[in-house]
Image (spheres, rainbow, N blue to C red):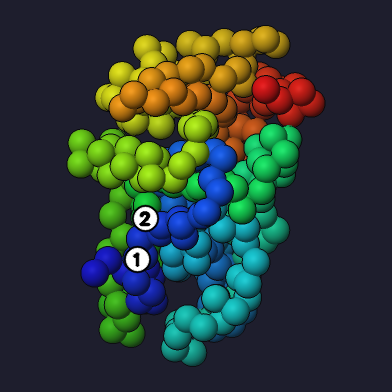
Amino acid sequence: MHRFPFGEPLLTLRQNPLADAGVFVLGVYASAVHARWLNPDGSTRVTALAVASEPYIFWRGEGQDEIIGSIDIPAEAGRLVPPGPGMNGPSGVALDELYLEPLGLSRQNAWLCDLLPQSRMNPGQAQAVRARYNPVAQALDLPAATIPPVPHRFATETRVEEILEEFISSGADTLITLGDVPLKEFVAPLRLCDKTSIANFGIQSGQYGQRHRFSLRGRSFYLLPLVHPRQAARLGAHNPILADAHERWMVTPE
């Protein structure tokens, strides 16, 4: 079993079944709970270290204090405290406020899914583990951090088929994709549409955020391609042109 720094297991996140799913939202990969790691003297060792799987898909960040406080860390290694604002749950908050609410929906009628239903270690986290965690882990005999790195491809052929079955069983009539990756790794392999990026659909008014009909197993569905939450919520490095397009869509969503 893969583990985070200090030993929390890597979890696979799935949507709890819904009785009335109107839309099926497909993201890229699951996030993690981040903590600020302090040295024994109170100085910061790592500003935001991924230490656990998020408790549910598209987590909003609530309960972070309890999650972080439950992680066992010896006094010699320092302590974990909540990180700065916005480090936990920003994509979940963005999903609710910038995607579902403009459509008049809530999580009660949105089936959520990721291409990869597990967290992965991005390059920044990998560097923090190598430089900051591993020396302490070796000195104090702490669990090895074994979360796999972010892959080049998120969905295998088998995973595409799993998501397809999940989409069909959800009962949703609209597939919302978040960013280019779900278009390239789910929509394109199934030939649901010939476009593989948000730019292909267009980002001008009247182009971005339109629904596109497709057929599957004798049924008619709609594809609603939207930008990744990083773009819509302007999180870190983002494209302001895409963010502006999504902001315009929120006013009069299709």
**Residue designated by label 1:** 10
The spot of residue 242 in percent (x, y) is 62, 22
Residue shown at 20% from the left, 36% from the top: 157
Q: Does 1 appear above or below 185?
A: below
N-terminal of the two: label 1 or label 2?
1
**Could you give the CA–CA distance between mark 1 and mark 2, rounded to whole angstroms?**
7 Å
Which quarter of the picture shows residue 220?
A: top left
| Front-lying residue, 14 or 125 | 14
Query: Seen in the image, is 156 located left or right of residue 227?
Result: left
The kind of residue tagged 1 is: Leu
Q: Which mark is residue 118?
A: 2
The kind of residue tagged 2 is: Gln
Q: Does 51 appear above or below 113?
A: below
Query: Seen in the image, is 243 located left or right of residue 167?
Result: right
Which quarter of the picture shows residue 15?
A: bottom left
- In the rendered image, the residue lying farthest to the right is 251
Q: Are marks 1 and 2 in contact (CB under 8 Å)?
A: yes
The spot of residue 22 in percent (x, y) is 56, 40
Image quadrant for the C terminus?
Answer: top right
Residue shown at 31% from the left, 60% from the top: 147
